[in-house]
Amino acid sequence: MAALKDGSSGGDPAIPKEKDRRTVFVETWGCQMNELDSRRFVGLMAREGYLEALAPDDADLVLLNTCSVRDRAEQKVYDYLGRIAARKRLRPGLLVGVCGCVAQQEGEEILRRSPAVDFVLGTGRIELLPSIVQRVVTEGDRPIEVGFDMDEVAYTPGAVARTVAHRASITIVEGCNKNCTFCVVPTTRGRERNRRLAGIVDECRRLADEGVVEIELLGQTVNAYTDPATGEGLPALLRAISAIGGLRRLRFVTSHPKNFDDDLIAAMAESEVVCPALHLPFQSGSDRILGRMKRQYTRAEYLDLVGRLRVAIPGITLSTDIIVGFPGETEEDFSATVSMLDEARFSSIFCFTYSPRPRTAAARWEQDVPVRVAQQRLARLDDHQQELQLRMNESLVGEVLEVLVEGSDKTGQRVSGRSRFNQLVHVDGIPGTPPGTFVMAVVEKGLANSVLARPLRVGHPAEPGGPDVAS
Ligand code: SF4
C-alpha cells in the first residue's frame, strides 16, 4: 500500500498492525476552517485505528469535505462523486461520506442523487464521524446527520491530526450570527457556538509543550468569541494564551469590523505574542453597497478602526476580502472600493466577483452587473493593489524581519516563511534550514507578493527570546 501517514499516537497494542489497518482519505475544498475540520476527521479516525491515505485509491474510507461559498461548489462535489462511484464498483467495501457545507445544505438530496454515498455529515456533527462509520458498517444504514448543538462547539481536544510540528490552528467559535445578504455561512455553519476559554487555553498549553510555536485561532467571526460559561471574550483569551511559555506567535482569523472594540486592540497591542497582522474584510468601499450587504458598518467606521489599529500597533499589516459586482454596484460604488485600497493600505487582498449562493437574500435580487463588467472590475482592482503592494514591499528594503521557516523551493537553496507581520519572505543562503526554524533576515528586495531577504541569524524554534545562533 502506497502513501500512508500514521495519524495516531502509535504503539497502542489495541491497534492492529499497519498492513491490517483501515485507511481514510479526505478531499478538502474551501476555507481554513474546512482544512482544520479535515484534520479533525483524520484525528478522530486515527483514534479508531485508521491510517491516513494520501490518495483516494489507497483508502477504505473517502470523505469529501465540501465548501459552498463559491459558485459551482455543488457541481464539483457531484463530479467528484461520479469518479468515486466508478472506483466503488471495483472496490465494493469502500465507504464514502460527504461532509462540510454542501452536506449541511443539500442533506438528503446527496443520497438521492448519488448512490455511491454511504452517509452525509454536516458541519455541526463532526465528532459523530466514528459512530456514523460504525453504523454504516454494522447496520448498513445511509445516515444523515446535519443538526447543530446550540450551546457549545463539540470538540475532542487532541483529536486533530496535525501536518506540521511547529504550527497549529484551533477552532474557538463556529457559526455566525450575522446575516450578510451574500453569505451562505449562517445556513451551512449555523449560529455561533463557542468553546470554553479554559479548554482552549489548556489545548494551547499542551501544543506549546509539544513544540508548537505559532497558534492561529479560527472562527467565522472569531472576534465575536464569548466563553459560554463566563462571558469572557477574545481579549481575555488572547491575554491568557499570551502568558503560555514557549509560544512565540498567536494569530486569529476572521474578524468582523463590527465586533472590534478598544479592549481587543489593547489586548493585541500589549502582547508580545499576538502578531501585528490582521485579516479584516471590508467587502465594499461604498456605504450604499455595504447597506445592501447588511455588513453593519460604514466606510468611515471601518477606516476609523483602521486608524485606531495603526496608532495602537505600529507597523500592523492588514489584509482584507472584497466582493466586486454585487447586485446594484455602479461604477461609482466600485470607484469607492478602489479608493479604499489607497486609504487603508492593505498588505494583501482576496477579491472575488459576486456569485449568488442558494438561500441567501442577494440571490433573489436582480443580478444586474454583467459578468464581463464584474471581471473587468476585478482585474482593475487587482492591478491597482499589485502596484500598491510592490511599493509597500520595496519600502521594506533594509528592514530586519523575524521569519518562521515553512519550507524550501525545489532546489532546496531558498527557504520561505512568514514574518510576524505575515509577509511572505524568501531567504537565500541557508539551504536545508528545516521548517519551524526562526531566522532573522534583512530585506534586500521587494516584490509584489513577497520580499527577498538575506539571513542574519538562525535559531531553534523552541528557544525563548528568539534566534541566537550566528550563521
Ligand atoms: S460575518 Fe462573515 S460569515 Fe457571517 S454572514 Fe457575514 S460574511 Fe458570512
Image: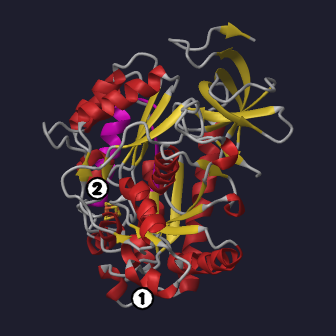
147 vs 454: above or below: below
> What's the distance in space between the residues labelled 2 and 1, CA to CA?
27 Å
What is the three-letter code of the residue carrying label 1? Gln
Residue under circle 1? 367
Identity of the residue drawn at 61% across and 68% down? 93
Q: Is residue 253 visible?
A: yes
The residue mark sitting in front, 2 or 1, is 1
What is the three-letter code of the residue carrying label 2? Ala
Q: Quadrant of residue 64?
A: bottom right
Q: Could you tell which of marks 2 and 1 lies nearer the N-terminus?
A: 2
Q: Is residue 99 visible?
A: no
Query: Is the residue marked by circle 1 packed among few (<14), some (14-19), or many (20+) residues within 10 Å?
Result: some
Frontmost residue, 61 versus 400: 61
Question: Where's residue 238, x and y in %?
Answer: 31, 31
The magenta span reads: 298-320
Give the SS element for disc 1: loop
288 vs 11: above or below: below
On the picture, is 452 further left or further right than 188?
right
Identity of the residue drawn at 33% across and 81% down? 359
Residue found at the far left of this picture: 230
460 vs 147: above or below: above
Residue under circle 2? 300
Is 359 in the magenta? Answer: no
Question: Where's residue 121, x and y in %?
Answer: 40, 66
Query: Is the residue marked by circle 2 packed among few (<14), some (14-19), or many (20+) residues within 10 Å?
Result: few
Q: Where is the C terminus found, in terms of image quarters? A: top right
Is 318 in the magenta? Answer: yes
Main secondary structure found in the magenta portion: helix
Frontmost residue, 144 versus 234: 144
Question: Where's residue 371, x and y in %?
Answer: 54, 84
Q: Mark 2 and ligand 1: say if the CB distance to the nearest ligand atom is below 8 Å.
A: no
